Image: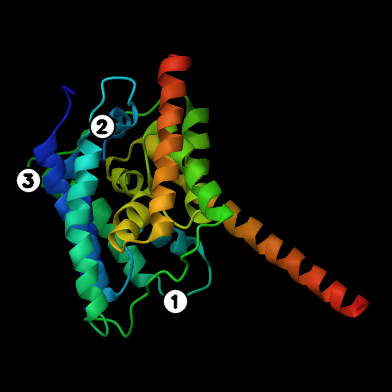
Amino acid sequence: MWIIAPLACGLIFGAGLLMSGMVQPTKVLGFLDIFGAWDPSLAVVMAAALAVSVPGFMLANRRPRPWLAQQYFWPSKSEIDLPLVAGAALFGVGWGLVGLCPGPALESLATLSPGIIVFVVAMAAGMALHEVWQKSRLTAQRSKLLANATDG
Amino acid sequence: MANFTPLSAAIGGVLIGLSAVLLMLLTGRIAGISGIFGGLLNLRGEDKGWRIAFIAGLILAPIIAGGIGYGMAPPRLPANWVVIIAAGLLVGFGTRLGGGCTSGHGICGIGRLSMRSIAATIVFMATAVITVAVTHHVLGG
């Protein structure tokens, strides 16, 4: 019954977004609008979340393995590269356009709002597009390597 | 700052942090929503169960809240469908290219004191602030 764990985590995450008001795009835009009637609430959400996650992750780091799995899946990348910066920049523009990031967008599917459904489908399309683009880049790289190998 | 709601923001933030820590302690996974959702779109791979469960919990939260009298208001979005679709595409492509979103980089990454995630968070916050400044104050949207 380990599947209860991620389900409960999703519920708690969703409750946090609801409670903080961050599930509402207008609330998020109020934070991003520093030249308008600025609402610092999102900064408080992040500070409070980090006050829990920093010591929590330190605790996880000291344990050999998770309670319900064989190993931790810590992210392996640590360098600040072009894809990171370009991707974050594009994401920020999309976030600023409507005030939705992936968590609140998926949670809001519960309201069956047509705008949300369209946003989530477009978001999935954007992710699929990235997958296809990444794959074609890798294939091109590989054929170039192969061509060079036969030339040399 | 008439709309500032520090108390509910703090309680909500604690719940979000708690969720991220529990998911790591229990299942060893990072609570990055774009990564969890993106992993579902990949046709290969067998680790889909926990992803579906997490997202199901996320969607169930407002339904349960509604059942006990704390219903969620439908989100207010721009009237222009082109803007909604463009934003969705940018969020989807950008989060995959940059390897994370507000939760993965902003809460989990910074929570692990990762410089990569701190950099990503500064960049997406900056472009989002610029986008809002342009659309709300320059274009007058």
Secondary structure at numbered mark 3: loop
Q: Is residue A18 above or below residue B129?
A: below
Crowd rating for badge 1 (residues with CA inside 10 Å; few <14, some 14–19, many 20+): few
Secondary structure at numbered mark 2: helix
Give residue B76's position: percent from left, percent from top.
Answer: 31, 28
Q: Chain of mark 1?
A: B
Q: Which mark is residue B46?
A: 1
Of circles 2 and 1, the one toward us is 2
| Precedes in sequence: disc 1 or disc 3 | 1
Label 3 belongs to which residue?
A: B68
Of circles 1 and 3, the one toward us is 1
Foreground residue among B84 and A33: A33
Q: Same chain, marks 3 and 2? A: no
Amino acid at circle 3: Ile
Give residue B25's position: percent from left, percent from top.
Answer: 22, 73
Give residue B39's position: percent from left, percent from top.
Answer: 45, 64
At x 74% / y 66%, what residue is drawn? A141
Residue B37, by quadrant, is bottom left
At x 40% / y 56%, what residue is drawn? B117
Label 2 belongs to which residue?
A: A27
Foreground residue among B95 and B74: B95
Secondary structure at numbered mark 1: loop
Between the residue at mark 3 and the residue at mark 2, the CA separation in whole angstroms equals: 23 Å
**Quadrant of the frame with the N terminus of chain B:** top left
Q: Chain of mark 3?
A: B
At x 22% / y 51%, what residue is drawn? A14
Foreground residue among A57 and A23: A57
Give residue A71's position: percent from left, percent from top.
Answer: 33, 82
Between the residue at mark 2 and the residue at mark 1, the CA separation in whole angstroms equals: 37 Å
